[in-house]
Amino acid sequence: MQHIFNKIILSEREDGTLIEENNFIESDGQVFYLKYLNEKKGSKGGNSSVFTVYTKNDEAKDQVIKISNYYKPNRHTKEHIKRRYGRFINEIGILTELKDKKKNNIIEINFDGIVNIDGKEFPYYVMEKADTDLKEYMLAKKEVDSQEKVKFCINIYDAIQQLHLEEYYHRDIKPDNILLFYEDGEEEKIIWKIGDLGLSGSRDKDYDDLGEKIGPFGWLSPEAVNKFITEEAGLGFDCKIDEKSDIFQLGKLFWFIFQGNVPIGQIEISDFICEVEHKEIIFALIMEMLRYSKPKRIDKDGLDPFVSELKIAFAV
């Protein structure tokens, strides 16, 4: 593997094929080889690079490795880089804790370690590999009925609550980070899990930079936008990204599940043009989740009655 300009790249031959013996990690005496996730040659976020790992003798299923783009800091390292590194270590800690607590709707970490590149130590962790994600699934499965969509919303809501009950916030909720697993290889048995906790926050740790963009454009909560645009000016707007911010992103996600696009700006029920039973109940719930003002935005106590109503209405 090579490290260039704060990203991890795999070692290739001139014809583009991978040099297998250069792209591997070792854990507990077992060798795991790296390959690209897809034809786009991997996935790179702001803080990490992601690849598939496999064994030559197929002793284990394909898994996914996430490698920090930032190496272990020293006393000369800039503070914002230290925070990026700390955020990755924090992600490993959260995933390990949630696995120990058997939170089965959170992506499961299998092991973690350090890979040495150019004399520098880069932390990584290996996790289970999903069959697909919510975005790919919903765009490919046009025939998903209303009852199934409601089940998806409820299962994803329950998964986020597993985080919130442990006083963690995801802060990066989008269809790409909602991962689908087929239980026992059967496509009729779907398990949804929350992935990519790289931006996760908590009540007692803060790895954010002043004015940093936290989360993906199109899915940002008002407070995340305020943080990115106005925080450095100190204008007094709410820039704290917490569990209420997750609820705002969930509202957008629910809209996407039912309609296939993203709600932006002022929306009315006439904009909710999908064909779905009990549309008024669903729209009312989403509108409560998308309130601009965080104090007025619905919380778990307010959400639970809506969720119960949906379960009754759709017999799920």
Image: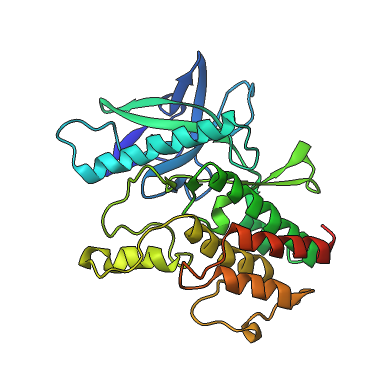
- In the rendered view, tell whether residue 107 sits above or below residue 218: above
| Residue occupying the point 70% across, 62% down | 305
**Residue placed most toward the observer, 188 or 309:** 309
Q: Position of residue 26 (x, y in %)?
A: 46, 20
Coloring scheme used: rainbow
Q: Position of residue 121 (x, y in %)?
A: 31, 27
Q: In the rendered image, which quarter is residue 276 located in?
A: bottom right
Q: In the rendered image, which quarter is residue 70 located in?
A: top left
Q: Position of residue 254 (x, y in %)?
A: 63, 65
- In the rendered view, tell whether residue 30 sits above or below residue 285: above
| Residue occupying the point 65% across, 80% down | 272
Q: Viewed as shown, does residue 231 lie left or right of 265?
A: left
**Residue placed most toward the observer, 82 or 119:** 82
Number of numbered labels in the structure image: 0
| Residue occupying the point 77% across, 36% down | 184
Q: Position of residue 156 (x, y in %)?
A: 64, 53
Can see residue 28?
yes
Q: Residue furthest bottom?
A: 270
Quadrant where the C terminus is found in the figure: bottom right
- In the rendered view, tell whether residue 159 sits above or below residue 225: above
| Residue occupying the point 54% across, 71% down | 290
Quadrant where the N terminus is found in the figure: top left
Q: Viewed as shown, does residue 181 lie left or right of 55?
A: right
Q: Viewed as shown, does residue 258 lie left or right of 204?
A: right
Q: Residue furthest right?
A: 315
Can see residue 10?
no
Q: Residue furthest top?
A: 29
**Residue placed most toward the observer, 16 or 208:** 208
